[in-house]
Image (tube, rainbow, N blue to C red):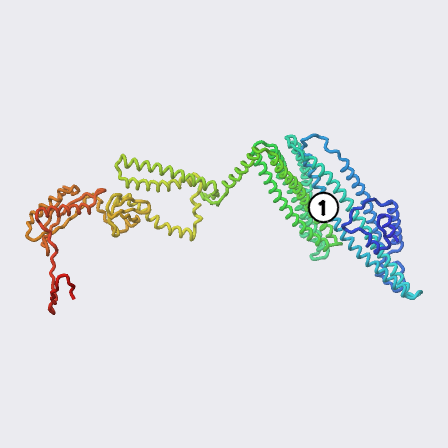
Amino acid sequence: MLVLALSAAFFPPFSWAQPGSSILKGAPGKDAAAPTQAPSDPGAARVRIEQEIARLRDQLERVPSGAEPAPPGIGPAEVENARKDRALLVVVYEAQLNSLARVVEQRKAREAAEKAEREWPGFTQKQPYAILLLDNLREEADTHRAAAELLKSSRDLAGIEMDRLRRKAKQAAEAVRRASAAVESTAAGTDARAAATWRLEAARGQAQAAGEALVASDLAARAFDEKLSVAQAQLRLTERKLAALSGPVAISTADVEEAHRRLETFRLQRDRELQSLLEVSARAHKERDTAAKALEALRTAGTVADNSPARDQALLLAEARLRAAEVRVQSIGAQVQILTLLLSHYHNMLVESWTWRHTALAGTDPDARQEARRQLLETVKNLTLWSSRSTAQANEVRSALQEQDQRVQAVSGSEVERHEQNARAALRDHEVALERERDEIARRLARLDHWQRDFTDVLSTRSIPEIGADLLVRVKDVAVRVWNYELLTIEDKTEVDGKTVTTSRGITVGKSIGAALLILLGYRLLAFVSGRAERVLVSRFEVGEEEGKTFRRWANALGLVALLALTLNIARIPLTVFAFAGGALAIGIGFGTQTLIKNLISGMIVLVERNVRVGDIIEVEGITGRVTSVNVRSSTVRGFDGVESMIPNSVLLEQKVTNWTLTNADLQRVVKVGVAYGTPVREVARILAECAERHPAVLDHPAAQVVFEDFGDNALMFGLYFWLNLAPGVSATQVMSDLRFLIEERLREAGISIPFTQRDVHLATARPLKVEVVPAGSTPA
């Protein structure tokens, strides 16, 4: 059979018996290795296949469709199917010829690639090698690697197709056996026997077509294997060359200039493409305008009766023409935009990337190297975003193409189809331009990925001082990014020529830290100045120590407020930055600080009015003592018992306050004493006045005064009224105690007694008192 002859001619290692059976045993699967030898006689096989194709075509031409004679019982459908099987066999033979030619061609290419791999002598130029050579080899390796991956996928698909064809060949062989059994079971010489014989031949034709299709598929798979072997041999050779470049690879200014020249050549080529596309765009716009005018003229023309079929068809054609022109204009506009971006932004990015690469690899300044690497990383980020945008646009164009295909199918065979096909061609041109753009960006990203690995390799060869310098630059870069990190953004509104201008200001970490340090240093300086001023006031101007402390505290508080305002102005932090505490938080803060602000303002009023000063003796809310300080929030009052009380400043304004030393520190006190009846009162008055004169704390002016106050129940009552100056260190209680000691002593010396308090004792006499006499030392009963 023909399948056996073809198989024996193409693949000597395998043995074919009949279509379907031996093929299932001998044909290689999708995991089979590539053939190791060429066909024994491909020329003879090609001749036989061409002869068979000629015979089948001659048969198909001599017997037109529907004219082939058939025995009774065979319907037209069966006859037509048999004719289609012969036509399909012609197509399968042609596929075998093409696959056989590819196998032979790829086998020669594989042998040449393997020979080149074996005989490569190495690089003739001396080290260090040019960086452009390294880039070319890397791109070549990426190309061979991508081709190998694609061929592996195609080979896998070919294996799946061979499995399907094996099943189909098996089914065809079973159909031949069933048809042969039907012939044997039918009586000879009858119409049924003739029909069964015809069906047997038709089944054999189907089996032959299935077997030949399997052979063609096997040949295609072998062509893929040979092509994959070529790509793998080329990849091995390229990787071998890359391994030979493992030594030092230098990048020089000449390399950068050469790269710039290549990029300029690339730019000029793209510029010519852009100019040509602009000319096409002008013609497309002209065609659109012409189509629009034709449609408008047709709509307004009155030569054709309204709603007639001819007018409707003409309008339909004009609308389709205009729509196709619009799609073409939009497609060309998108292509112009792509080329413009490639010529401007993309070209400049490539030129700058080579400068940054040279700086990163050969630069001596650590800061410049670090900046170059950062710029290249930013380039990778931008290209990735660009690729994503291009992919999204390509998806949109594919969706538009699918819709356009549906329109083409809907108008297939009509005059409108030509315009719809033009619109589809325009969309396809747009898709091709986007694919080209994505491929260009993908190649550039792959090159940048290699560059990043080069930077890592160069770092591994640097000396320890260079590594330290690079590390210091990285730490500095991180610190700068942290320093400039924006915590929040504030919108600031200003009036310019009567117009409100809104500007945004960022509050960065650096501004915050700088403001905090400025406040800290400023407050330290303020505290130093206020401390010096306090000491000057106390030493030179005889200001009290407590008053000096009060001055220092208030100077620090007011200075801190001014320092905060000045710091915010210098750091350019607007006051509106604190407006974020709006709403409920602002209300809470307002209520929380209400008392604090109230006491702060009250303290300022107290200091200004000077009704309560440091050193004054006051009485407020049952507390009596000397004011020792007037602070920002409260004032301190030290009682005569030494206990200090914190009085809120607002209390000094809102409550009743008694200031004993408001105008002067003189205070009148009284010591009262009683003497027995019959004592000479003038002598008593003299003694009391003498005691007052003897005490140094009692003022001479006004002089002490002795008052005979009352005839008491038990004694004659006298009062010694005297004046004291309540200067710091003077205690009225102690003075009064001293006077009492002196008065007691002088009265005792003068023989004047101070009587006891007299009381009348009344006894209950309702019953007599019991009187009992007991011996001494005994216990009463």
Q: Nearer the viewer, residue 422 or 760?
A: 760
The residue lying furthest to the bottom in this view is 767
Dot 1: what SS? helix
Residue 577 lies, with reference to residue 124, above or below; the image says below
Can residue 524 be seen here? The reply is yes
Q: Count the marks.
A: 1
Q: Left of 248 or right of it: where is 555?
A: left
Residue 441 image position (x, y, % from top left): 65, 42
Q: Left of 748 or right of it: where is 352?
A: right
Q: Nearer the viewer, residue 529 or 327?
A: 529
Residue 105 image position (x, y, % from top left): 81, 42
Instruction: Count residues near mark 1 (Cα–Cα under 10 Å), then give few for <14, some for 14-19, many for 20+.
Output: some
Q: Could you tell me the amino acid type at mark 1?
A: Glu
Quadrant of the frame with the C terminus? bottom left
Q: Which residue is mark 1?
A: 149
Residue 754 image position (x, y, % from top left): 11, 51
The residue that appears at 77% across and 39% down in the rendered structure is: 114
Q: Nearer the viewer, residue 160 or 501?
A: 160
Residue 308 image position (x, y, % from top left): 71, 57
Can residue 355 be seen here? The reply is no
Q: Quadrant of residue 142?
A: top right
